[in-house]
Image: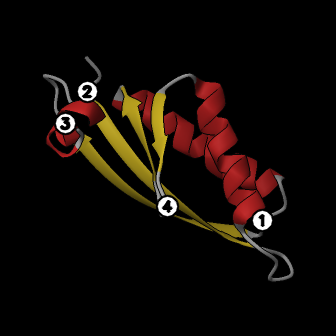
């Protein structure tokens, strides 16, 4: 079982004040390509996996958004870590029908 959940909100600075959504989409593409379990939510995306792997994905996300043209990024991150395992499904099962 994966040992971590990581929720991230990417807040890119755009060169000319344009819409940030294409930059956020680019960051989400990095998550999709990684193969980890994830869930996109309105204000953040949550990933499930091994902590080291998730942190490496965060680094790649930031690099990809800069390569896409952002001049700077704030990444707000929340981590739930448990060496015995943690999962999105377990945390939200009581809220699902």
Please give the label number shown on residue 9.
none
Q: Is residue 80 left or right of residue 18?
A: left
- The answer to whether residue 12 of the structure is visible from this angle is yes
As helix, strand or loop, the secondary structure at mark 4 comes to loop
Q: Nearer the viewer, residue 5 or 64?
A: 5
Q: Residue at x 16, y 26 (%)?
A: 83
Q: Is residue 76 left or right of residue 30?
A: left
Q: Picture coordinates of residue 13 (x, y %)?
A: 70, 74
State how far apart marks 2 and 4 are (Cα). Answer: 24 Å
Q: Nearer the viewer, mark 3 or mark 1?
A: 3
Q: Which residue was labeled with disc 3?
A: 93
State how far apart marks 3 and 4 are (Cα). Answer: 19 Å
Q: Which residue was labeled with disc 2?
A: 3
- Mark 2 and mark 3 residues within 8 Å of each other at the beta carbon: no
Which of disc 1 and disc 2 is earlier in sequence? 2
Q: Which residue was labeled with disc 4?
A: 42
Which of disc 1 and disc 3 is earlier in sequence? 1
Which of disc 4 and disc 2 is earlier in sequence? 2
- Mark 3 and mark 4 residues within 8 Å of each other at the beta carbon: no
Q: Picture coordinates of residue 8 (x, y %)?
A: 46, 54
Q: Is residue 62 left or right of residue 51?
A: right
Crowding at mark 3 (Cα within 10 Å: few <14, some 14-19, many 20+): few
As helix, strand or loop, the secondary structure at mark 3 comes to helix
Q: Is residue 44 left or right of residue 78?
A: right
Which of disc 3 and disc 2 is earlier in sequence? 2
- The answer to whether residue 87 of the structure is visible from this angle is no
- The relative height of residue 73 versus residue 34 in the rendered view (above or below) is below
State how far apart marks 3 and 1 are (Cα). Answer: 37 Å
Q: Picture coordinates of residue 68 (x, y %)?
A: 83, 54
Q: Picture coordinates of residue 70 (x, y %)?
A: 77, 65
State how far apart marks 2 and 3 are (Cα). Answer: 18 Å
């Amino acid at each position: 079982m994966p040992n971590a959940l990581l929720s991230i909100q990417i807040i890119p600075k755009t060169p000319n004040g344009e819409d940030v959504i294409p930059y956020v989409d680019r960051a989400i593409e990095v998550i999709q390509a990684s193969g980890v379990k994830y869930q996109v939510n309105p204000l953040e995306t949550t990933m499930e996996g091994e902590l080291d792997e998730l942190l490496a994905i965060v680094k790649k996300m930031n690099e990809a958004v800069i390569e896409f043209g952002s001049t700077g990024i704030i990444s707000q991150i929340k981590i739930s870590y448990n060496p015995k395992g943690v999962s999105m499904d377990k945390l939200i099962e009581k809220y699902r029908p």
